[in-house]
Image (cartoon, grey):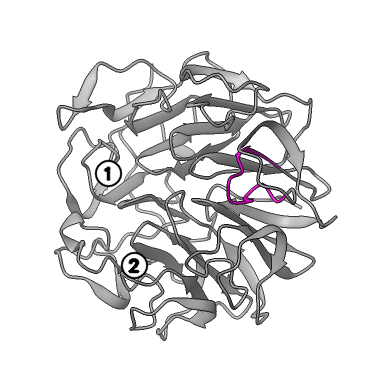
Amino acid sequence: MRLVIVGLLLAGCSQTTEPSGPPFLALSVGSNHACGIASSGTTLCWGWNGSEQLGAATGEMCATLYPCSTLPVPVSGGRLFVTIAAGGTHTCALDAGGIAYCWGSNRLGQLGDGSLTDTATMAPRAVVGGLRFVALSAGIDHTCALTSNGTAYCWGTNFSGQLGTGDTATAVPAPVSVGGSLHFSSLTASSNFTCGIATGSLYCWGDNTEGQLGSGDTVQRRTPSLVTPDFGARTLAAGPNSLHMCAVNASQAPYCWGDNVAWQLGNGMVTNRYNPTPVTTSETFQGIATGGAFTCALAVTAAAYCWGAKGQGDLGQLGQGSAAESSTPVPVAGGLSFRALMSGDAFSCGLTMAGRVYCWGSGFRGALGNGSTVTAFTPTEVRLPPQP
């Protein structure tokens, strides 16, 4: 079975015009940067580059303080990747043989190269251990991946138990298996916790300060803990900065739980929920992606909806054309149809069937990939480099 962790690969209608550059085949959004794999095979990244997470040297500065690239740049080394996962200050990818490579910050072992060298690297490093993976997800400072039989491995920071090994070692610089002998069909790493679907049930582990583990309390879990009640979760994806979690079930109904101070649970309230809570909407969804203070999702029509951002609407996270905020889902402006959608700290990007990438929200660190640092209240197209 093909496992998709780094994006919501969803059916949808495409635009009729072709992109100006090589289209993207895959997309991933990190905290303040994003990456994609072009049809040419080139891996491109854009946004914040303070820890060389773009995999390239950039001379640009955003807001005078942050090394960045406001346009996509190719990852160094020329390796061909088939899966990409952007995290907090690092990025990982899989080649066609399932070998994982990572680049960027390694201060907490999130590159998985066996070291804890606190020196950022733009050159992709092979993850040690010789494991071959079929799926990959990067959190704020940790990374997780799945083998073909559904065994989950994680590496990086573990101060909240987000590696699922049963302890809270400060940092683990090489892949370790998640405890519980579970076989996962999907997996997503977030800020300081991890969730995955195994044998039809949803499990989460790590920090639970805001109730993001869905266990009915705020107790930290160091191994996979069953999310209750079981609502039949089938699709999930969490951004690296999220303190809440969401998933869509087989009936295409969205549920969210955890931090709700910014309306990001979509139930019209600002109270944290410690168990899965239905999003207040009549729409049905194919997939969902959590951001920092907001959430976005893809309807079955391939239209994008977002909600939340209480008090931060001037960053444009909802993409509805203004600084207005909403405690329940509202449609993203522009009428675009997406097949993939992911959210970062204060921005989102979507991939159309034609391979065009559009982003909206905060452009503060160049994360919109359009050559600007200006906030976009509606989707703006990522400016792809021309084909050689």
Find out whether residue 157 is within the magenta segment: yes
Question: Going by the image, does 223 lie left or right of 144?
Answer: right
| Residue 323 sits inside the magenta stretch | no
Question: Horizontal placement of 132 versus 194: left or right?
Answer: right
Instruction: Please give the name of the residue rendered at 30% of the width and 69% of the height, measured from the top-left corner.
Output: 262
Q: In x, y percent, where is residue 290?
A: 44, 60
Residue 203 position within the rendered picture, expressed as x and y whole percent measured from the top left: 68, 65
Label disc, if present, on residue 381 of the rendered structure: 1
Left or right, residue 12 beside residue 61: right
Q: Residue at x 53, y 66 (%)?
A: 212
Q: Is residue 41 visible?
A: no
Q: Is residue 127 above or below residue 212?
A: above
Inspect the image, locate mark 2, and give the three-letter code of the amino acid beneath it.
Answer: Cys
Relative placement, left or right, of 130 versus 38 is: right
Residue 64 appears at what percent x and percent y?
15, 27
Up/down of 343 relative to 146, above or below = below
Main secondary structure type of the part rendered in magenta: loop
Give the distance between the C-alpha atoms of the residues marked 2 and 1, in whole angstroms.
Answer: 18 Å
The residue drawn where x is 75% and y is 38% is 176
Q: Amino acid at mark 1?
A: Glu
| SS state under label 2 | strand
Q: Which image quadrant for residue 266? A: bottom left
Identify the residue position indicated by label 2 in the image: 306
Magenta stretch: give its range.
Answer: 154-164
Q: Nearer the viewer, residue 14 or 155?
A: 155
Residue at x 74%, y 51% (from the top left corner): 166
